[in-house]
Amino acid sequence: MIRPVLTRATLAVAALTVPLAAWSQNNVTVYGLIDMSVGQFQTAGAQSMKAALSGNMSTSYLGFSGSEDLGGDLSATFALESFFRANNGSSGRFDGDTYFARNSNVGLKGAYGAVKFGRITTPLFVTTLLTNAFGDSFGFSPAIRQLFIPSAGMLPFFGDTGWNNAIGYSSPNYSGLGLNLLTNLRQGAAGATGSNTSFSALYFGGPLTATLAWQQVRNGAFGTPAGWENQQAWQIGGAYDLGSVKLFGQAGRVSTSATVDTHTTLYGLGAKVPVGAGAVLVQYGSASANVPGTADTHNRTLSLGYDYLLSKRTDVYGVVMNDRQSGLSSGNTAAIGLRFKF
């Protein structure tokens, strides 16, 4: 009886150790981020809520990525990245979210750029986080909130921050300029009217960051209006680091083609001011929704915070946010949080 047990144990150990040895030769990295904040949270027109929430400053996630040198300046790459909610241990950003919703792709990288296949983060999301003071914060950044998760009463945004069944290309860096192309296949998606398409240009030169992005969504959208055809979005953005302060600005428009054509106009201004071991963050965002035959609905959001670095991996922050919308009572948020990167 002892020998079979030992044999099974030996085989189990071998099954675990062989992949680990192979992974170590292929340069695989495990990484992620855990973000938790506590406080009072309130959007315009809603009841205030006292809560401990995950992912307000940065969405918590766990990732695995790797590459293998194929020779001749060519490498194979992969990425598997999953969002989770640290406050209750649930996977995804919300119930029912795709498990590897952040990224799930494989590709090739060489002298002429990189090609990826799978689920890929959209260029529009990347340009938005680069040109506002709060980065990729779904909880506190007016730029992210007003574009990707408009509040009730505003016009919906379709397309998410990542696309399924996608093919993406990123060019080499040309004197600070990089180009990105992304498209996907509808593959029988309900309500699809064709493939999604996106483009971005990013320039990094000294203190200047400049971005341009455009996308058209024709599939992967839920709750679309009657006569749905597509939704197009464009955005220009920039950031300039003066040393004593880094300034941010962006402007854009989201237009939906359906039986009733609608659009939302957005702009934002922000600043990041180094203070001590951290920085003061301020960002203002404006969104105006237009539906023919009705008065425009306006959303104005202002966020102010301080992010203090305890180390290269760990920071603590405090944020207050005021959210206003046409015809609704003002919403006020005040929270403190801790973020750990690994």
Image (tube, rainbow, N blue to C red):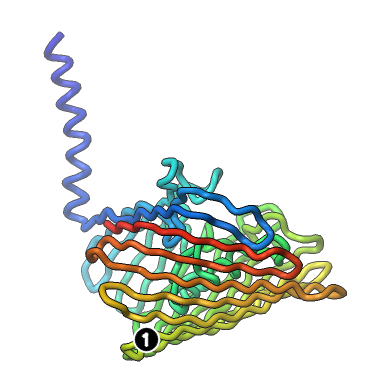
Q: Which residue is at the front of the view, 70 or 233?
A: 233
Residue 59: name its quadrant. bottom left
Residue 293: name its quadrant. bottom right
Residue 106 in percent (x, y) is at 38, 59
* Residue 158 visible, this angle: no
Quick one: which residue is furthest to the right in this view?
A: 293
Which three-letter amino acid code belongs to the residue tagged 1?
A: Val
Above-or-below relation of 300 to 67: below
Residue 149 in percent (x, y) is at 60, 62
Residue at 17%, 16% (x, y): give it.
Answer: 5
The crowding category of the residue bearing disc 1, from other C-alpha atoms within 10 Å (few below 14, some 14 to 19, many at least 20), is some
Q: Which residue is at the front of the view, 161 or 169?
A: 161
Q: Is residue 44 left or right of residue 168?
A: right
Residue holding disc 1 = 245
Q: Which residue is at the front of the view, 188 or 332?
A: 332
Q: Quadrant of the C terminus?
A: bottom left
Above-or-below relation of 49 to 141: above
How many callouts does the rendering have? 1
Residue 2 in percent (x, y) is at 12, 11
Residue 335 in percent (x, y) is at 45, 59
Q: Disc 1 on helix, strand or loop? A: loop
Q: Is residue 264 left or right of residue 109?
A: right
* Residue 184 visible, this angle: yes
Q: Which residue is at the front of the view, 108 or 220?
A: 220
Q: Quadrant of the N terminus?
A: top left
Residue at 31%, 88% (x, y): give it.
Answer: 243
Residue 153: name its quadrant. bottom right
Residue at 45%, 44% (x, y): give it.
Answer: 91
Q: Is residue 43 left or right of residue 82?
A: right
